[in-house]
């Protein structure tokens, strides 16, 4: 059996946006105890795109929820910008797999929701929502409601809403998992374009190896029961150009290695 590893932080501390050290999570019920995470350590550099890849039940979404401040760890240290997390923050945006739009609000109103809570006036909110409507290509749907949108369009709105609050970190929990293959591919390409323009640090959860290799600069591969890091993989290998796979041999080599990790 492969042994879980603790990544070595061989980068300058100033470059690190997210630092997780020795993270464990135990759920307790009246009948039993379940350890979801055990001694998980990872880092994400500023403006980096990192994926956490693993099978269902390995705890990758739990890591994201702890990063978002939606759950507390049982043990370990979780810091963003050097500050220990103690609850939700507008500095950390979250995009879920399920569509989380407010159905009674228009696309523009959904994007402006957080801005309104911040106290920005209507003119200020419109300037920002116009920017992100353009960024996700939904200018003509600004006054539409979620029931009038496709799945891919709803996720575009969710991404725009998160980015409109100018987060330091964007946390994405399998956001394209429910989409058809063609829509998923176009959304992956859009996300990369947005990331390159906005330079937001992204932590992306997926169980799709191809998706992780296409999107990420680095990948943390996890095992389940309990969830632990198996290996840290450099995915910034220039395997793709303009959305097309250009180095099939190298891609298959890395993919086979990840499959072997997941099958151990």
Image (cartoon, grey):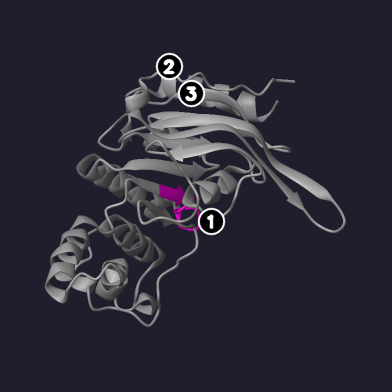
Which residue in the protein does label 2 denote?
A: 10
Task: Judge by depth and name the residue closer to the eye, 135 or 227.
Answer: 227
Nearer-the-camera pick, 109 or 124: 124
* Helix, strand or loop status at disc 1: loop
Residue 172 is inside the magenta segment: yes
Quadrant that contains the C terminus: top right
* Rendering coords of residue 159 (x, y %): 34, 57
Q: Which residue is mark 3?
A: 233
Of the numbered discs 1 and 3, the one sitting upstream in the chain is 1
Return the disc, 2 or 3, that comes first in the chain's sequence.
2
Q: CA distance from mark 1 to mark 3?
A: 28 Å
From the viewer's perspective, is residue 31 above or below residue 243? below
* Label 2 Cα crowd, 10 Å radius (few <14 / some 14-19 / many 20+): few
Q: Secondary structure at mark 3?
A: strand
Give the camera-side residue of 21 and 65: 21
Q: Residue at x 44, y 50 (%)?
A: 172
First along the sequence among labels 2 and 1: 2
Q: Is residue 239 visible?
A: no
The segment highlighted magenta reads 171-180
Q: Is residue 62 left or right of residue 117?
A: right
Q: Which residue is mark 1?
A: 70
**Most prominent secondary structure in the magenta stretch?**
loop
Label 2 and label 3: CA atoms lie apart by 14 Å
């Amino acid at each position: 059996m492969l042994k879980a590893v603790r990544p070595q932080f061989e980068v300058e501390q100033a470059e690190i946006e997210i630092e997780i050290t020795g993270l464990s999570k135990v759920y307790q019920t009246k009948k039993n105890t379940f350890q979801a995470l055990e001694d998980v350590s990872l880092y994400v550099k500023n403006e980096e795109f990192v994926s956490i890849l693993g099978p269902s039940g390995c705890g990758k979404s739990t890591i994201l929820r702890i990063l978002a401040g939606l759950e507390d760890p049982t043990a370990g240290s979780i810091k963003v910008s050097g500050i220990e997390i103690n609850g939700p923050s507008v500095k950390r945006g979250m995009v879920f797999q399920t569509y989380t739009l407010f159905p009674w609000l228009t696309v523009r109103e959904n994007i402006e929701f957080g801005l309104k809570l911040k106290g920005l006036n209507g003119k200020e909110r419109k300037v920002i929502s116009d920017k992100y409507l353009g960024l996700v290509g939904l200018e003509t749907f600004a006054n539409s409601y979620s029931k009038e949108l496709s799945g891919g369009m709803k996720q575009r709105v969710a991404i725009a809403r998160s980015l409109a609050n100018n987060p330091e970190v964007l946390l994405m929990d399998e956001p394209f998992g429910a989409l058809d293959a063609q829509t998923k591919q176009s959304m992956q390409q859009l996300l990369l374009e947005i990331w390159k323009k906005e330079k937001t640090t992204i932590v992306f959860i997926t169980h799709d190896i191809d998706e992780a290799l296409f999107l990420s600069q680095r990948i943390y591969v996890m095992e389940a029961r309990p969830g632990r890091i198996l290996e840290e993989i450099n995915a910034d290998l220039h395997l793709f150009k303009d959305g097309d796979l250009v180095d099939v041999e190298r891609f298959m080599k890395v993919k086979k290695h990840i499959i072997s990790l997941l099958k151990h």
